[in-house]
Each structure stands twice: as C-alpha cells, then as structure tokens.
Amino acid sequence: MFGGIQVPEANSITLLGVLFDQKLSFGEHLRSVATRARQRLGLLRRSAHLLPLAGRITVYKAFVRPLLEYAPLIWIGASSSHLSRLDRVQHRALGIIGPGAILPSLAIRRTVAALACLYKLQVITGPPQLLAVLPARRQQSANPRTRSDHASAAGHRFQLDASLPASTPLVLKRSFPHCVLHQWNALPCDLLLHPPHRSRMQAFKTQVYRYLRAENWMWATDSV
C-alpha cells in the first residue's frame, strides 16, 4: 500500500535506466542492452569503409560501448551467461572494425571501474552514507609472518574484510563491492601512496590496468 492505494506487483521495474527483476539477475536488462547495442553497430558498419582503423575504433567507443557500460556497478554481479551477451557485441564490433583492433575487455573495464569507485570512497573519502555500507576495514598485522595470504601481503591500509557468512546469497557475493574485494586488497601499496586527489583518478585507473594485465588476466584484451 502506498498512500492508501494498493500498488500492483511487477516482475520487473526500471529505475534510472536499469531494469531490476525480482531475482536481481539482471538478465532481462542485459538482454535489452545487448539488443540496443547491436542496433548501433549498423552505424559502425555503414561508416567502416570511410574511416581508418583509429576512426572506426572511435565510433565504437563513442556510440556503442557506452551502452554496454551504463551503470555497471549495479549489475556487475550478473552471471557469466548474461554478461557474455555484452562480450559478443564487442566481438562483433571488432569484426567490423577489422584486423589490428585491440580493445580492453569489458570485464577488465568493469573491474577497474569498481576499484576506482572504492578508491574514491576510501582514499579520497566519499559520503558517510556510502562508506557505512562498505565492509569493515581489515585489521593489519604488525608481524608480516602472521599474514596468511597474498592480499594481506600487499599491506595497504585500505584493505576491507572480504569474508562473508556461508549462508550469504550468491547474488550478494557477486555484487559490488564484494565481487572485487580480493583484487582491491591485493593492490600494491604504491598505487595508494600518492596524495589522494580526484585529478589522480585517470592515473590510478591506468596503473590498475597495468597491474591486472601483469597478473595475467586471461580476458584483459579483445582483438581480431
């Protein structure tokens, strides 16, 4: 009931351009996104013969990829079968762009976006209301020999507790920020030592890209 009026149940609802279903699987939303992005590939296909390689990549980045990356932190925890719909759109775009095209994978871009959000919230210090929903800070050990994993060995003071109860629903485990806490905790100290400022965001993202590639991410790039 809302204001004395019975509100009918709905299987899904759209809020600020994102379609939420009852199970928060975001399957319907990502199907819609992939469909609209494929339609925009027509613009790329029609202009491909008129543009050099760099121009074709620019058209894709300007008109197609923004659709695939709208509000990613909301649906970043969707299943791989749903997320693969977006990957197929980028692979199709690469086929149109032609040989020599290399782009960061959508998976690594989502991960970097999530890590950049944590950087904004913790290092630059975000609104208290958002900080309150993050996991607690991980306790730092004074003795390096007591550190039991690689994440602790990274040692930066912004590490978050990545543990969750065994009964935690899978949809929560996959959601932001839990889905990137291990990557966040494992970031090298030198990425977080510089004086924090919003003007450093692009430098931070670039350094994180390099770090993830060095960690041998199998899906770091897409190419033809």
Image (cartoon, rainbow, N blue to C red):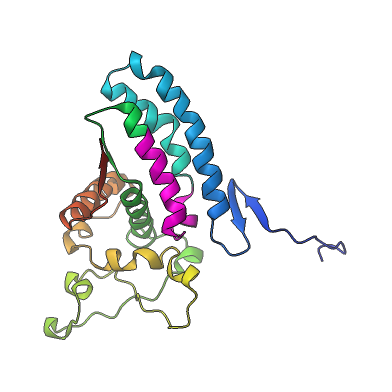
What residue do we see at 31% from left, 22% from top?
A: 55
What residue do we see at 38% from left, 30% from top?
A: 60
Residue extending farthest to the left is 145
Q: Identify whether 98 is placed above or below 90.
A: above
Q: Identify whether 218 is placed above or below 184.
A: above
Give the x, y percent position of residue 92. 38, 35
Magenta: main secondary structure: helix
Question: Considering depth in this image, is 16 or 10 the residue closer to the camera?
Answer: 10
The answer to whether 200 appears left or right of 166 in the picture is left
What residue do we see at 20% from left, 60% from top?
A: 193
Instruction: Report the magenta residues as a range.
Output: 71-92
Give the x, y percent position of residue 76. 44, 57
Question: Considering depth in this image, is 58 or 219 the residue closer to the camera?
Answer: 219
Identify the image quadrant of residue 180.
bottom left
Give the x, y percent position of residue 9. 76, 61
Q: Does the magenta stretch include residue 1?
A: no
Identify the image quadrant of residue 126.
bottom left
In which quadrant is the N terminus drawn? bottom right
The answer to whether 83 appears left or right of 103 in the picture is right
Residue extending farthest to the top is 50
Q: Identify whether 164 is placed above or below 196.
A: below
Question: Considering depth in this image, is 109 or 88 the residue closer to the camera?
Answer: 88
Give the x, y percent position of residue 219. 27, 51
The answer to whether 212 appears left or right of 128 in the picture is left
